Image (tube, rainbow, N blue to C red):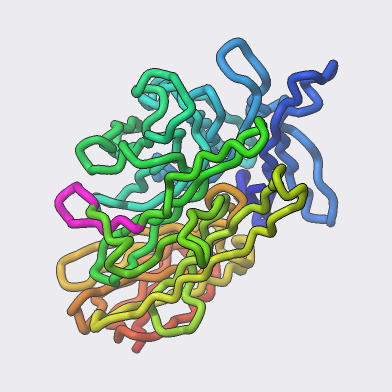
Amino acid sequence: MLLCDFNNDGFLDIYTANRRAAESAFPRAYDNRLYLNRGDGTFVERAAQLGVGVTYTPHSNGVTHVAVCFDYDADGDQDLLVAEDLAPVRLFENHLERGTLSFQDVTSAAGLNHAGHWMGLALADTDLDGDLDVFVTNWGTSPLYMAPPDKRLHALYRNNGDGSFSDVAQAAGLAQGEFGWGAAFLDWDNDGDSDLYYAGNFYANLGNLFVGDNPGHLLLNAGDGTFREATAQYDVFNQDNNGRNREARAVAVGDLNGDGYFDLVVGNAARWDVNQARAIPGRPAVFINPGGPHHWLKLRLQGTKSNRSGVGARVGVEACARRQVKTVQSGSSFLAQNSLVLGFGLGACARVGRIDVRWPSGVEQTLSAVNPDQTIHITEPAPFSSVEFKAR
């Protein structure tokens, strides 16, 4: 489920991902839903009318694993990205005009028309060029699947800044990993760029057949367009006490102990053991970041004219000639929700020169001369064209 203010009226709308039951005589009953918030405690469903129901077609099996919203083209409204099974990652561009909401399917034009078993989505500005890139998990290199390699590998869609994306996963070293469900970006080492964690595995429907070769992967951004494996370095293997890989589903990130370094939570599924005729519980794994010497900054946003949680706000942080861009999201990867508090790693930089916030309402806000190693609560100001003040 995704919460997002698609029409910028200050109220969060609800988009639900669904899956079609193959045996159903009523396939449209399993379409995705978009519930627009009326602002009076009620909602109205408009997915089919707006063309974002993502129905069963000859090119899609009608299974949506996850959806996220983000302003991919930086035009001030929230676009919709949907990860489907046996279909492309669908991108619906929001054409909001004077309060009237409409969407256009720009999947092909954006270069996303590549089918796969897309299951988890993660967003970050991985190359620090000012726009958000997209990592999507797939079946990967795990066994028991005979599709050609180009239909099974993970993707890192780099946002080209012109409305299109390019898959750079092979060059980045991210394409070849095992089966993946949840994924999340975070700056694990607080060096100022986005690192990646993803996990997976599953039990097939045929008895005790287990696709279990994914121990979980922490991949650190090298800053040159590539990522390096760091799972063993930080001992963040998603395994039980016997060293068996768990069946991960969800991945979420947030600063659990308030030290400025974001931690990891992995949701693991239960499984049925046919030999013992009993359920084996799935237990979550919590990985506390050991921290380090680098500076950091956390931002907690509160909307006034915009939705109170600040969902959809776009934040830029400039420190020591480096600019990072992040957005507040409600609805993250598969079955997960990351912290709404934004975390920025600053490396050795001991001063933040500027923080820019663009609220969903269109209000722009600037903070300057900010000290690191603190959490700042930013409240949306009155709807003037821009607001600037200094913080310490």
On whether residue 221 falls in the magenta region, the answer is yes
Can I make out residue 77 in this image?
no
| Residue appearing at x 57%, y 71% in the figure | 302
Nearer to me, 205 or 236? 205
The image shows residue 201, relative to residue 51, as above or below, that is: below
Left or right placement of residue 172 versus residue 244 in this view:
left
- Residue 201 in sight in this render: yes
The reply, left or right, for residue 364 in relation to residue 170 is right
Q: Position of residue 324 (x, y in %)?
A: 29, 61
Residue 146 occupies quadrant: top left
Location of residue 163 by image quarter: top left
Residue at (74, 33) in percent of width and height? 46
Residue found 57% across the figure and 30% down from its top: 103
- Left or right of 206, for residue 368: left
Which part of the image, by quadrant, shows the C terminus? Answer: bottom left
Q: Which residues are magenta?
A: 218-227
